[in-house]
Image: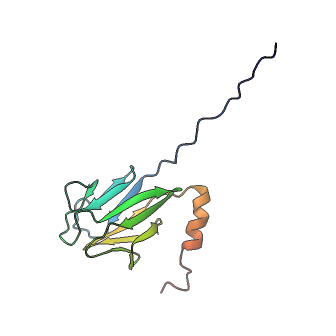
């Protein structure tokens, strides 16, 4: 009789845990930091969003942050005044560490760690020193 062998398969890899800190650039803002560790995450001034920001220039559901392959992606949800990443109006954009996210009058800087494979992406996307003045 032949015995069947069972192959041991590792459990499917879960997506890496990412904790994003959005640091407000207004020193009088409260809270000064917003920590997000669950995705997708909707931001806006409405009561039914994941993160509520008290800014009358924000739409009730302004934008959504999603995790895609270890990188945060921000998507505008049809807001009236737009979503900006590094000064550019976007409909969808990667939000890399150090990028500025502007929603209404609220200006935030994204802080999080990329995985080792995504670090090369950040290096390729980073502006060269010659561009910075």
Position of 88 relative to 23 (above/below): below
Q: Number of labelled discs? A: 0
Q: Nearer the viewer, residue 1 or 97?
A: 1
Image coordinates for residue 95, horizontal then vertical, percent: 45, 66
Q: Can you name the residue that lies furthest to the top here? A: 1
Image quadrant holding the N terminus, namely top right
| Residue at the image position 47 percent from the left and 87 percent from the top | 133
Residue 98 appears in which quarter of the rendering?
Answer: bottom left
Image coordinates for residue 110, horizontal then vertical, percent: 40, 64
Q: Nearer the viewer, residue 1 or 69?
A: 1
Image coordinates for residue 66, horizontal then vertical, percent: 42, 58
Residue 88 appears in which quarter of the rendering?
Answer: bottom left
Residue 99 in sight here:
no
Image coordinates for residue 114, horizontal then vertical, percent: 53, 58
Q: Nearer the viewer, residue 114 or 1?
A: 1
Q: Can you name the residue that lies furthest to the front here? A: 1
Residue 42 in sight here:
yes
| Residue at the image position 77 percent from the left and 17 percent from the top | 3
In the image: residue 21, left or right of residue 9: left
Residue 99 appears in which quarter of the rendering?
Answer: bottom left
In the image: residue 7, left or right of residue 64: right
Q: Nearer the viewer, residue 71 or 34?
A: 71
Colour scheme of the rendered structure: rainbow
Position of 116 relative to 121 (above/below): above
In the image: residue 46, left or right of residue 89: left
Position of 4 relative to 47 (above/below): above
């Amino acid at each position: 009789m032949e015995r069947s062998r069972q192959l041991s398969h590792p459990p499917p890899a879960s997506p890496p845990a990412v904790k994003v800190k959005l640091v407000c650039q207004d020193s009088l803002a409260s809270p000064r930091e917003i920590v997000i560790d669950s995705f997708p995450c909707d931001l806006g001034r409405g009561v039914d969003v994941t993160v509520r920001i008290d800014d009358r220039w924000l739409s009730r559901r302004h934008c959504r942050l999603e995790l895609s392959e270890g990188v945060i992606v921000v998507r505008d949800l049809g807001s009236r005044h737009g979503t900006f990443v590094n000064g550019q109006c976007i409909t969808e954009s990667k939000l890399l560490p150090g990028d500025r996210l502007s929603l209404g009058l609220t200006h935030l800087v994204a802080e999080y760690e990329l995985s080792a494979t995504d670090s090369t992406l950040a290096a390729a996307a980073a502006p060269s020193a010659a561009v910075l003045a």
